Structures are given as C-alpha cells and as structure tokens.
Amino acid sequence: MTYDVTTWRAPGRTMRLAPGAEWRCADGADIIASLDAELPPGPAGKVGEGGRDGVGHRAAWLYRHSGHVRYTLYGYSFAGGTYLETVFTSADTTDLGWAFDAWRSVTRSAE
C-alpha cells in the first residue's frame, strides 16, 4: 500500500506529513525501536509523551544541522495501530518552538 505525502513550505520552513504503515502485533516500545533504527543516527534529543484528542502517544527525534537547514524534527503521533509522521525543518534555530507546537497540535477525529 502506498501513502500520499503532503508538503507545505513557507520562507525558511518546511513541514511534510505522511501516514505511516499499520503496525500489527507490535507494542509501542517495538514501534519506537523500529523507528529509531530507521532514522539517522545521532539525534540531538528524543521526546516521548502521552497524547490527547484521539492520539495515544507521541514521539519525536530532533536533529541539528550546520547548513542552510538548521534543524529537523521527526515527529510521530500514534493512534491505535497507525501513526502519522510529521517532519519539520527550518533555517532558524530560534524557531524550534514552532515545530514542537505544530507536532503537538496534531489531533485525530473519529471521521
């Protein structure tokens, strides 16, 4: 099964959304370990927290860069056996709050 990826851009910022594959017969720890193995090595930080508004839990990996793109935040929002991957990049390191706020604003409706 293929999934559509949606990308939004604004000056100095990019946000990409992609629905993840369904996870069957795996618990949260297994899913997080699998994602951690697929992401680039050496994150500057990792965050895990409980969810709300239809999201079971969230996990994020932060990477800092020295080029034009100053950071990348890979954020995951889990609901049941599925997840939504959100990737935020920015050229401004003082703008990190924007990425975390946007990641935490993801909700899931019953539709």
Image (tube, helix red, strand yellow):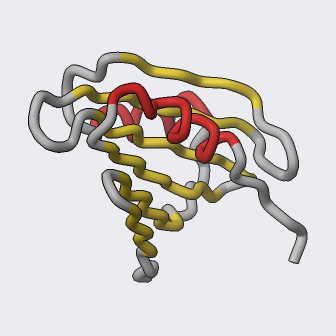
Q: Residue furthest left?
A: 67
Residue 65 pos. (x, y %)? 17, 30
**What residue is shown at x 47% (from left), y 66% (from top)?**
18
Q: Is residue 16 visible?
A: yes
Q: Quadrant of residue 6?
A: bottom left
**What residue is shown at x 12% (from left), y 28% (from top)?**
66
Give the position of the C terminus as an image quadrant. bottom right
Give the position of the N terminus as an image quadrant. bottom left
Tell me: 103 left or right of 71: right
Q: Quadrant of residue 35?
A: top left
* Above or below for 94 versus 100: above
* Above or below for 19 versus 51: below
Residue 87 pos. (x, y %)? 41, 51
Residue 36 pos. (x, y %)? 36, 32
Q: Is residue 38 visible?
A: no
Residue 38 pos. (x, y %)? 28, 42
**What residue is shown at x 49% (from left), y 54% (from top)?**
85
* Above or below for 27 versus 93: below
* Above or below for 8 versus 95: below
Tell me: 32 left or right of 14: right
Q: Quadrant of residue 7?
A: bottom left
Q: Count up the numbered dots.
A: 0
Residue closer to the observer: 32 or 51: 51
